[in-house]
Image: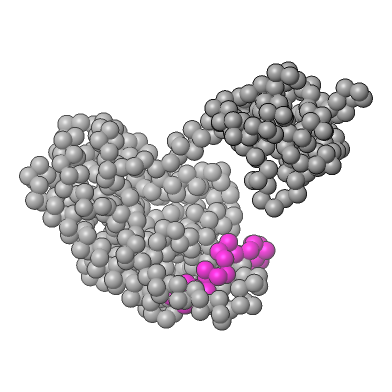
Amino acid sequence: MIGGPFSYVYNYRFFQYNKSEHMKIAVYGKIFNTRRKRWMLTYDLDKRNGRALYEYLYQCIKEDILNGRLITGEKLPSKRALARHLQVSVITVENAYGQLIVEGYIQPVEKKGYFVRPVEGNVKKGGRGKEQAYLHEIVKSHQKPDWFLDFTANGVNPEYFPFSVWSRLMRKVLTEQEKGLLEKVDCQGEPKLRKAIADYLYHFRGMDVAPEQIVVGAGAEHLYGLLIQLLGFQKIYALEDPGYRKIGQIYKRYGVDCRYVNLDSDGLSVEGLSQSRPDVVHICPSHHYPTGIVMPIKRRQEILKWAGGEKGRYIIEDDYDSEFRFTGRPIESLEGIDHWGKVIYMNTFSKTIAPSIRVGYMVLPPHLMEKYQREMGFYACAVPSFEQHTLAAFISQGYFEQHLNRMRNYYRSKRDQVVEALKKNPAFAGSVIREADAGLHFLLEVQTRKEDPKLVEECRKRGLKIACLSQFYQNPHAGRKHTLLINYSGLDCSRLEQGLELLQSVL
């Protein structure tokens, strides 16, 4: 049967004896049944995907009523007329009409026929098209633009993802863990994964934590929500200024009081922390985002002393990319030198494996772990068992360490390539590169007279996406000007030379 889910057709005799001509006419326009003086319903019954004819016909007419294509009071074709037109049995149409009558979409009128009944929420004819166009625009506005070069992107080169190892481990997990994959997951996560994470933290970060202290969750954002519930909505949270904007957005969505504390050359200001009088402070001591500052031991000890000075104070240590430090050993974690039980350590596998691996974890002090089990143990773990078993095998069998070493070399090489391109370009001779030895981004101080918002907008017009350090301050006018964040992990280096020329033209 021709036409879309809904179309209009000339009279039945023309359809029965002139199918080829009708096909042409139906494709190029709406055809009115001049003999009956009304439109005839046509549906493509070949698209019913195995459903009974009457059920599919019922569904099509119902949708047309709800979408306003069939308006209140409109008369439907008789059962015999529609059956003849659609080339189905009268019983099929009768059953479809019967279901519509029972559900109140149409009503029979003796000796007159079947009519559409009023339906609550019925839209005007053509309304569905407008709604779909509106929804399409909403979705389109949230789609990622096709940038010529994105200096802000985090990403993983597919050539460097261990697909063969990952797929082999997945198959092995399916074979060996058949029954276990169907069972309920512990509220803290799979014991095998927590054991693998604890071993990794001990050997790589020098953290002596028990698997029982670890909670696995669907990324850091999910874990922030759990922490707020655990510590209390009445707590006051201190955040770094400048800082990663999404952290503040999440806390505010939970309705908690957030206060921003300025940074100095060593990281979060202890004086500012004391003046803000918070209960919980969220910091990135090993590699601050976006400034790249590595907090020295003296400042770490000062913040630990602040937390230990009063009951109910805690530090959330966000260790988002400490694995990619390119000079010296990894910086010692706050949790590793905490003697008060005040540090909550958080990390994810988004940077180390891929952003799509929505697996994060936090390490709770023993007394908070006891509270978590008591008050929040009813929660189900948000990460599927299948993924947890695969990740546990990936870590415990040494593949994670191999992958980290490979990616560390790859990112170091990529960073050097970007830095070398900047140094070779005469236009950036006066620029200064800062904090390039830790993490997957660095700062580039450029020489220009243009204000940061103007820089961002003019780059956007040329297909370049950039971020300025001032955008990460609560008061952008108080931030350091003309300093760009260069996230090189997802940078397309094949376009780097041309991208820098475009950037130079804006500056």
Q: Going by the picture, which residue comes out furthest to the right?
A: 110
Provide residue 459's location: percent of width, then percent of height: 25, 36
Residue 3 visible to an observer of this rendering? no
Q: Nearer the viewer, residue 309 or 197?
A: 197
x 58%, y 27%: residue: 25
> Relative to 445, is 219 above or below?
below
> Relative to 504, is 48 above or below?
below
Quarter of the figure with the N terminus:
top right
x 21%, y 58%: residue: 415
Task: Identify the magenta region.
Answer: 371-394
Provide residue 57's location: percent of width, then percent of height: 74, 40
Provide residue 400's location: percent of width, then percent of height: 38, 74
> Relative to 23, is 306 above or below?
below
Q: Main secondary structure of the magenta part?
A: helix
Please state if 204 lies on the left or on the right of 189 as rendered. Answer: left
Q: How is the image coloured?
A: one colour
x 40%, y 61%: residue: 354
In which image quadrant can residue 231 be found? bottom right
x 19%, y 34%: residue: 506
Q: Nearer the viewer, residue 284 or 417?
A: 417
- Can residue 339 be found in the magenta stretch? no
